[in-house]
Image (cartoon, rainbow, N blue to C red):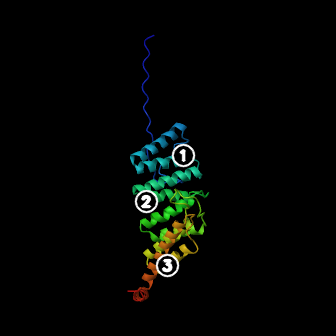
Amino acid sequence: MGPRRPNKPRRLQPVLPRERLRSEPSPGGSDYCTFGEPTLRQQGQVFSACGNAGTRGDLEGQALALRIAADWAPHDSEASSGLLLAAGNAFYESGDKARAIEVWQRIISEPHRTSEWPKAMYNLGLGEQKRGNFRQAMKYFDLLLESHPNDKEPGQNIMEVYRNYSHRSALQLSLCYEKIGDLNNALRYARLAKTSYPYHSWCGTCIYLDTREVDKRIAYLLARQHPLTFALVVALCLQTLLP
């Protein structure tokens, strides 16, 4: 027998599956084709690619890797929602608000409401607000308020003790109403942010600072709503000051 011929080196597979667009989106809203159950090695490659993209500052690459990982995670699960939320956040930070909104919408469209649902709903409101779609943003913030979220859900870091979904949503609604010229409702939601949806924290200084900011907003909206009355009050106050 002659000498054995060396085996041909195997071609390395790409870390991420090649993206292929469909004429119609899949039911999950993703434009990736389904590749079946991933192996542990494939899952590791995706997470490695995600980490590498994050290290390089490639937010779009990180978002794409996270979205693929979410497609591979069990459908309608906490794992899938967490990955989708992170993907949407990465798209948003990369400047691609349209794709961020598309990904966050997948979370709120699932029949089972996961723990990421209120975060996705709030992010959708912010995303539409940044795009100038104030009425659509208001719908998301309203839905979040109506859902009675857990405002004392632990925050992300020591500077954010609780999530305060309701308080933040009320303030964002106030801003949106102001943008569309409805000062009555802008003032109404600013007051609700102080009374019905107060800021929660164990930090007394944090509560004081937030209350002061809300009071300043209420005063600002009153001044816009009744400019002449506000000017007279200011003039009266100035006259009573000691020389």
Q: Amino acid at mark 1?
A: Trp
Q: Amino acid at mark 2?
A: Ala
SS label for mark 3? helix
Q: Is residue 80 above or below residue 177?
A: above
Q: Amino acid at mark 3?
A: Leu
The answer to whether residue 21 is left or right of residue 204 is left
Q: Nearer the viewer, residue 21 or 118?
A: 118
Residue on which disc 2 sits: 98
Name the spot of residue 144 as percent of width and height, x first: 56, 66
SS label for mark 2? helix
The answer to whether residue 115 is left or right of residue 184 is right
- Comparing labels 3 and 1, the label whose residue is closer to the camera: 3
Q: Is residue 31 visible?
A: yes
Q: CB of mark 2 within 8 Å of CB of mark 1?
A: no
Name the spot of residue 152 as percent of width and height, x first: 59, 62
Name the spot of residue 113 as percent of width and height, x first: 60, 58
Name the spot of residue 107 as percent of width and height, x first: 54, 57
Marks 2 and 3, how far apart in space? 30 Å
Tell me what residue is drawn at x 56 percent, y 47 percent.
73
Marks 2 and 1, how far apart in space? 23 Å
Badge 1 density bin: few <14, some 14–19, many ≥20, Cα 10 Å? some
Q: Is residue 17 visible?
A: no
* Mark with earlier residue (3, 1): 1
Residue on which disc 1 sits: 72
* Mark with earlier residue (2, 3): 2
Q: Quadrant of residue 240?
A: bottom left
Q: Nearer the viewer, residue 240 or 235?
A: 240
Which part of the image, by quadrant, shows the C terminus?
bottom left
Residue on which disc 3 sits: 187
Tell me what residue is drawn at x 51 percent, y 53 percent.
84
